Amino acid sequence: HRLMFRSLERLSAALPDKLFFVIDQAEDVFPSDGCASSDQSEFFNLLALLSNVTLDLKLLLGMRSEYKARFDEELSARDVDLSSVNSYYLNPITEDGIVDAIVRPTMRESVAWYHETLPPPWEHYRFDYQKGLAQVICTDLLRSADPSSWLPVLQVICDRLYSKLPPEGERRITLHDYRAAGSCNAQVSSHIEEKIIEFFSRDQTARISLADKADRWKTILAEMADVQLDGK
């Protein structure tokens, strides 16, 4: 680990107060069969080392809440002082939170962010929703998607609607635009297909049609998805 820590020291010195690492889905360090692996041990040994050295960096670990106790137990077994580790439980997003996330880019007021005041989001995005459409999208999302996928599905829906706005003229997303894009779950499938076709359309010599390639890759991606015991 000596070489890695030396590199981190140089990075933190070059970027004071800015070095920030994010490890998402940290629960994946625990094997699905429940048996501890050498990789798991090495991972927590590294975290223990990081907690005992002085480096100008922050490490953010994201995980599902049911793994938090196991995570803390592994750290405690390595004499990590948990008082130096801050925890934050991210509550499930509410219906009001979903609506707020949809309309936030259209806000015309400045946004307070910690000790800063950010410019109105509308100045960057410059578009509006038809009145009441955000609530319609939220209702469809709550009815059609699993709670664990609300935010990813919402991100796809909003991104696809925004990407189809004209560069000039009236930039308003209407109920007709939303319905024409398809249902919540259908939009995710369409989004994946569009991105696959966009990628392979660069190769004009391909003998297989883009539609066939998209179908094959969607099948492959579905096979690669890891379903947890709770079905998520």
Image: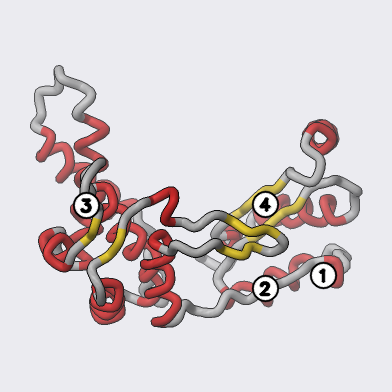
Q: How far apart are marks 3 and 4 (CA)?
A: 58 Å
Tell me the quarter of the image containing the C terminus.
bottom left
Name the residue: 29% across, 78% down: 135
Residue sitting nearer the eye, 100 or 54 = 100
How many neighbours does mark 1 have within 10 angstroms: few (below 14), some (14-19), or many (20 or more)? Answer: few
Query: Considering only order in the chain, which callout, 2 or 3, is on the residue closer to the N terminus?
Result: 2
- N-term mark: 1 or 3: 1
Q: Position of residue 12 (x, y in %)?
A: 81, 38
- Reading the image, the residue beneath label 1 is 76
Residue underneath mark 4: 38
- For the residue carrying disc 2, how many other residues have a C-alpha within 10 Å: few (<14), some (14-19), or many (20+)? few
Camera sees residue 229? no
Farthest residue in the top direction? 205
What kind of residue is marked 4?
Ser
x, y percentage for residue 40? 66, 56
Amino acid residing under circle 1: Ser
